[in-house]
Amino acid sequence: MIASLLALAAAIAGPTAATPLRCGAVERPGIAEHDGDGEWRGAAVDLCRHIAQGERGVGATIAFRAYRDMQDLRDARHDAVAVLSRAELAATLPGTSPPSGPPVAVSRQLLLVRADGPLRSLSELAGRKVCFIIASEAEAALNGWARAAHIPIQRAGFQEPVELRDAVDAGFCAAMAVDAGDIPGGAEHTTALGPPLAELAVFAIRPNAAKLK
């Protein structure tokens, strides 16, 4: 009887600092990604910790996860905080009101060239080799931009950021397509060529707080 009463009292009181706040986001550089120790970091993770401490006090913990497929996105309705783009929100939580506040972050993909190199305009990339990390958002943004701009480019993919940077330094690549939140270390001598290839704003949604209609 006493144990039951204690459990009921805890339920009425609501979550405590010992109860992790459940949050999630699609993995994106600078927004939600694993660091070298396997810990989550990025703007979405920082926001989750901030909300947890504001609602549950100092010492509050979080349980962060990645939305890797459509089922994960559908399950976002069970999280306390979901960081999504407008398109992801519309596809997975259709009854939720569109975000009205400022974005948590903006994912941007850029074309970078050597600052001391000869290239000064996007049209000069015609026939030249542009490099990227394989299967990255930057690769997808590059392909979309090249189709829309009708600029024929050569492509070369790499597995590691350091290899990508070295290829640009050596002149093997005229430019590299990268995420603004994941520019290879040692690339301070590069500069953006033209506007971003693509931009995507992500917003904080409170699925548990907002009643789906």
Image (cartoon, grey):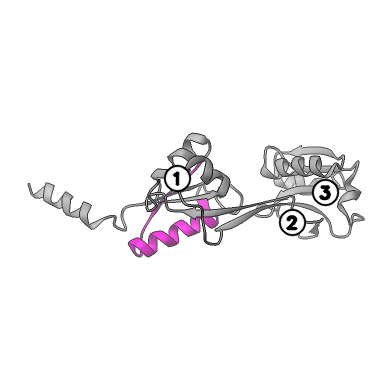
The reply to whether the C-beta atoms of the residues labelled 1 and 2 are less than 8 Å apart is: no
Q: Which residues are magenta?
A: 40-67
Q: Which residue is mark 3?
A: 175
The residue under label 3 is which amino acid type?
Ala
Instruction: Count residues near mark 1 (Cα–Cα under 10 Å), then give few for <14, some for 14-19, many for 20+.
Output: some
Q: Nearer the viewer, residue 41 or 77?
A: 77
Instruction: Count residues near mark 2 (Cα–Cα under 10 Å), then give few for <14, some for 14-19, many for 20+.
Output: few
Q: Which residue is mark 2?
A: 186
In front of the other: label 3 or label 2?
3
In front of the other: label 1 or label 2?
1
- Outermost left residue: 1
Instruction: Identify the mark nearer the N-term, 1 or 3.
Output: 1
The CA distance from mark 1 to mark 2 is 45 Å
The reply to whether the C-beta atoms of the residues labelled 3 and 2 are less than 8 Å apart is: no
Q: Nearer the viewer, residue 198 or 94?
A: 94
Q: Nearer the viewer, residue 188 or 16?
A: 16
> Per the image, is 154 magenta?
no
**Image position, residue 60 (x, y; %):** 36, 59
The CA distance from mark 1 to mark 3 is 42 Å
Q: Which residue is mark 1?
A: 95
Which residue occupies 80% across, 60% down?
189
Q: Relative to residue 69, is residue 185 drawn left or right? A: right
In front of the other: label 1 or label 3?
1
Classify mark 3: helix, strand or loop.
strand
> Per the image, is 48 magenta?
yes
